[in-house]
Amino acid sequence: IQRNDIDAFREEFLEVHPYDQARFYVSQEQDVRQQISSYLSPSEMAELFHNLDSEDQESTLEEMEPAYVADMLAQMYADDAVDVLNELEKDQVVSYLTIMDDEAAQEIKDLLHYEEKTAGSIMTTEFVAILANHTIKNAMKILKSEAPDAETIYYIYVVDDEERLVGVISLRDLIIADDDKLISEVMNDRVVSVSVSEDQEHVARMMKDYDFLAVPVLDFQRHLLGIITVDDILDVMEEEASEDYSKLAGVPNFESQDHSAFSAARKRLPWLIILLFLGMFTASLIGRFEEILSQVSILAVFIPLIAGMAGNTGTQALAVAVRGIAIGDGDRKSKMQMLRKEIGTGLIIGFVCGILVMIVVDLWKHNIVLGMLVGVAIFTTLTISTMSGALIPLLMHKLKIDPAVASGPFITTLNDIISVLIYFGLATLLMNYLV
Amino acid sequence: IQRNDIDAFREEFLEVHPYDQARFYVSQEQDVRQQISSYLSPSEMAELFHNLDSEDQESTLEEMEPAYVADMLAQMYADDAVDVLNELEKDQVVSYLTIMDDEAAQEIKDLLHYEEKTAGSIMTTEFVAILANHTIKNAMKILKSEAPDAETIYYIYVVDDEERLVGVISLRDLIIADDDKLISEVMNDRVVSVSVSEDQEHVARMMKDYDFLAVPVLDFQRHLLGIITVDDILDVMEEEASEDYSKLAGVPNFESQDHSAFSAARKRLPWLIILLFLGMFTASLIGRFEEILSQVSILAVFIPLIAGMAGNTGTQALAVAVRGIAIGDGDRKSKMQMLRKEIGTGLIIGFVCGILVMIVVDLWKHNIVLGMLVGVAIFTTLTISTMSGALIPLLMHKLKIDPAVASGPFITTLNDIISVLIYFGLATLLMNYLV
């Protein structure tokens, strides 16, 4: 179908949603890809291009001529173009911006300044803004003419002479309202907005809570700089969820599917090597108790049980705390509450598991002292590991470090050390009764 | 301000976004809450109510009169009302539905049938649908009259005489189009839709990929049953991310903030007790090697290191695989690829860590045989634990079990057992050289 008939191909292809176009595009060989892009105008290509993975975007850019790329980027929504450019080398960015038409280049340059993961970095400047003294009828006319370029037309922002945001009106209200009314009469002047330097995760939570389709972004003088639309927020939520998840597992960012085993190993190894040396430290701690171990070798049998349970309870408490911080308002009172609750939880869990272990070990080894030793060690370590699992992310949050950095493996290894110290400390005390 | 002047309170209160109304509402004492609800009409209360947590919703319902509740539920979007009712006892649901007006009750009953977490359970029936032979002008008129009741008016669905979906037109296109054209001329007849029994996670991924604000839900004969709007998808994404995260940490669902330590412990304990017995099993395995241990007590020193590293690599591989399955298309080829990649990654990680440990142990203990033993054990266990971390979720996916069920602690404990067997198996072989 594509070999010869451009028109037939275009007609068929452009009827499909750009996401499906993109999937078809990447599944083709390079020469077919180049043929497709030659059939499409830069603005048609822009829609397809927006739906590619960032890796596919890079390789696609290399296959296309710079002038075509510049045209295409200019046709994309400015925020999406900025996402693409952020992945490229500095000199590539400059060269594309140089050959781009001035207006589009300026819009993109303005957005490139904002720090990653802030509201500024995900906002777009293609919004509809009008003055408050228009009539509804007039506003509809303006909307009609601006609609093709705006990323959303479902909210119209009302500004004063100095571009300061004074109100908002949804297209829904606009449609319901009488034609002759003034915008100022029907607009909502309590606009919920975000600051340009706001964290993207905060913006996402806000849009979820308020059920917004878009939110305006202001500078500190309340000038309207841009808007953030809900489709970008879906991406942010996916990204942040992925990040929290990967940190809990101790994987620094997720590798994409097509990466090789080598690059996957290279990403995971640094963490593992740190943990390895922490593990060696644990080993050296146990080494100090070698004498006891050689006399009461049965002690070794319960090391993985105690260390493992400490790791499990610590990870549970960590996950609950990280999630609690992410969802909660994070005021000091609720944090103290959370900590107090976790201490209580740790005590209960420790008590139940401790008693259980004591009974089982007692029945199994017919040794009450050993049973008590392991039981008390479990009780103490589980209480402490639950507490530390909650305390560490709370402290990090207080120190303005992302609490999710305290990954699962790190907490687990820390709790290994604590549990070994407690276990052998107790064993040393009970030494006389054990031999 | 609230004591006396109803009108002033209403004016002030209703200007605020319902989400903020809800936050104010829950922060008040019971008598103030009842006063507020008496000031508001059921439909005003419905908007506030929709923004409460499900726990606060339950306690609020108990404070209100059944007739008021029924009125309020009828005023909510049907999908939101269903969410509320799903949390209640069967007989409560029936009693509310009985006193509700028939039309609203019927809509809610229809939605209550759908299984949880399917497209049907999150869809709403308040959408705008028209026939294809209307003109644009006519369609705008219909829209204007239906706008107040519809959950979104930004997509208008086009149906045939038998309510089968034949096309869609966005409000944006409607506004840009000429007044006299027919809907059938401007509508898009390639509508992306979901089936009513589709998993909600799949719907969320689709809306994210296609940047939709709403998606139509069809039965198997392509009758239009409802739509799913993006605000519900934000909630779904949050819910699913929370779920994956909690499973990786081995916490069955997240407790909400205000739960007590007792209920938190009760939720975490079942898992911990299972893991405790698995840990006892590991202990009994080590017990079989007690004789070797009593002769070469230094062996015990490295047990937590090896078990810990196996747990860490297993969790990493698990997280990557679960995420890969969630994001990927899940076809067989890419799964085989993923598995092959993880085996490669495991071999590399095992090799690097094994060599490192061998060198460190050798330098520390001046014992080449011990260094080799620990090094080879690390190499073997890390390779196997990486592989099992990837293989188990892939197998679960194949068996149609949610791969996220294979939680971190479970994989960790499994890898504990494997690593202990390998370590002591090797130690037995090398026994003669170690003593």
Image (cartoon, coloured by chain):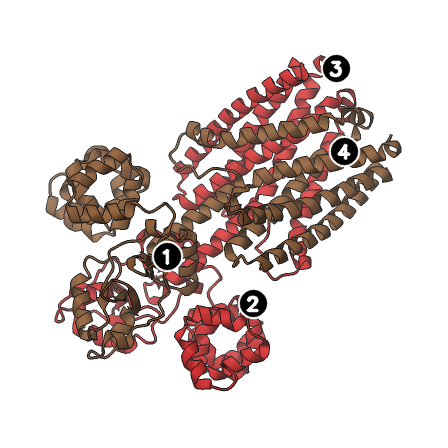
Chain colours: A brown, B red
Name the quadrant of the C terminus of chain A: top right
Which residue is labeled 3 in the image? B435
Mark 2 → mark 4, Cα distance in angstroms: 45 Å
Which residue is labeled 4 in the image? A424
Q: Position of residue B388 (x, y in %)?
A: 54, 34
B100 up-or-down from A319: above or below = below
| Amino acid tagged 1 | Ser
Question: Which numbered disc flags the more N-terminal residue, 1 or 4?
Answer: 1
Res B162 visible: no
| Badge 2: chain ID | B
- Residues marked 2 and 4 touching at CB (< 8 Å): no
Q: Could you say whether the residue bearing mark 2 is in a helix, strand or loop?
A: helix
| Badge 4: chain ID | A
Which residue is labeled 1 in the image? A195
B311 up-or-down from B359: above or below = below
Question: Which numbered disc flags the more N-terminal residue, 3 or 2?
Answer: 2
Mark 1 → mark 4, Cα distance in angstroms: 54 Å
Residue A383: image tag: none
- For the residues tagged 3 and 4, is the chain the same? no
Q: Nearer the viewer, mark 2 or mark 4?
A: 4
- Residue A52: name its quadrant: top left
Q: Position of residue A134 (x, y in %)?
A: 20, 73
Which residue is labeled 2 in the image? B55
Q: Nearer the viewer, mark 3 or mark 1?
A: 1
Front-lying residue, B259 or B145: B259
| Badge 1: chain ID | A
Res A132 visible: yes
| Amino acid tagged 3 | Val
A277 up-or-down from B318: above or below = above
Q: Nearer the viewer, mark 3 or mark 2?
A: 2
Label 2 environment density (alpha carbons within 10 Å; few <14, some 14–19, many ≥20): few
